[in-house]
Amino acid sequence: MKKLLFFVLILMIGCQNSTQKTMEIPNEQFDIQGHRGCRGLMPENTIPAFLKAVELGVTTLELDVVVSKDGQLVVSHEPYLSPVFCKGLQGEDFEDEYKYNLYQMTYEEISSCDCGSKVHPKYPEQQKMKVSKPLLNAVIDTVEAYIKEKKLPLINYNIETKSEPKTDNIAHPAPAEFVNLLYTALKAKNILARATVQSFDIRTLQEIKKLDPTLSLALLIGEKPYFEKNVQELGFKPAIYSPYYVLVTDSLITYCRKEGIKLIPWTVNDYETMLKLKKQGVDGLITDYPDRAMKLVR
């Protein structure tokens, strides 16, 4: 009788642990991506923004890369200095958004420009500081060192190539050269297994697919909610389908599940919408406010 009771007790404990693990899985898998680090809280695409996002607990850092005149990968959403939140080479305010083409500037010149002190009209909570656009290598090195120092879980990187056909060799290299630079950098930092390359420009995704068919790729969609057509144009199934969040529908979620493709929309900033999308069944979301999104998994 004692043996029987012991056996039943073990089964109950095992079932309890199994249930607990099952309940924990969705939280572990739901991918909260800090958009440009955490643009709502810190100057976008800067090292302080990435460290703040890591501190808040995101699973993935979302960032953008462009190429400088001297062939270095610079973390920047635009291939030029934005007059909205950057100052020029002389520390001046300016209005022409194309005045400073980063592809025509050395990184030394780029790094001398302040892109964190100006008040951003769309992000009043953003902490202001004098900070410049960093190199991709510096971001990875700093984040990895911070994670190691704080004994935090490893972070993933979702890196967007900023390019389009009409600005090839004007604001950025042609796709093959661009992705070669990026792939070489990711491989050198030994983070290929934790990296995703995303783009609206399917040419860059097609080129990097040739380099490494195993690398995680994400197709960004801004205004074309035609899943099958978009994937057909790409020429292969991406690991991630990443539309503007208003394009997410139940039928899109069903399609992605059927095709084995993760669905991670951008850029979701209010908590109620985040919660609605999570309940609908998306696999994660990209947000300017990771502090709000972390409530989904706590």
Image: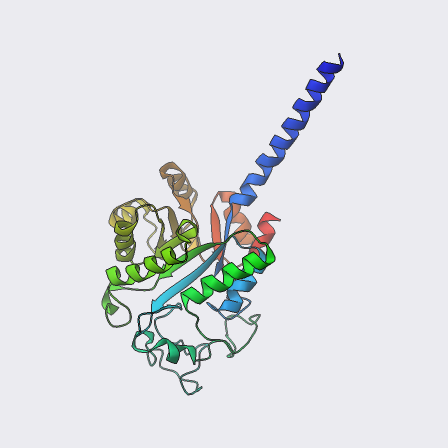
122 shown above or below 184 = below
Q: Nearer the viewer, residue 285 or 185?
A: 185
Task: Please tell me which residue is depicted at 31% across the width and 44% down the height of the picture.
Answer: 237
Q: Residue furthest top?
A: 1
Residue at the image position 44 percent from the left and 82 percent from the top:
87
Q: Quadrant of the N terminus?
A: top right
User: Measuring 71% from the left and 22% from the top, which residue is drawn there?
Assistant: 9
Of residues 51 and 145, the one drawn nearer to the viewer in this rendering = 145
Tally of numbered tags: 0
Residue 36 in sight here = no
- Looking at the image, residue 175 sits to the left or right of residue 189; the answer is left
Residue 133 seen in the figure: yes
Q: Position of residue 47 (x, y in %)?
A: 50, 68
Q: In terms of image quadrants, where is residue 95? A: bottom left
Q: Is residue 68 left or right of residue 17?
A: left
Viewer-nearest residue: 72 or 58: 72
Is 208 positioned to the left or the right of 249 in the image?
Answer: left
Above or below residue 165? Residue 215 is above
Where is residue 202 drawn, in percent x and y? 28, 55
By what rule are the colours in the image chosen? Answer: rainbow
Where in the figure is residue 163, as x and y percent of width and height? Answer: 30, 64
Q: Position of residue 176 (x, y in %)?
A: 24, 59
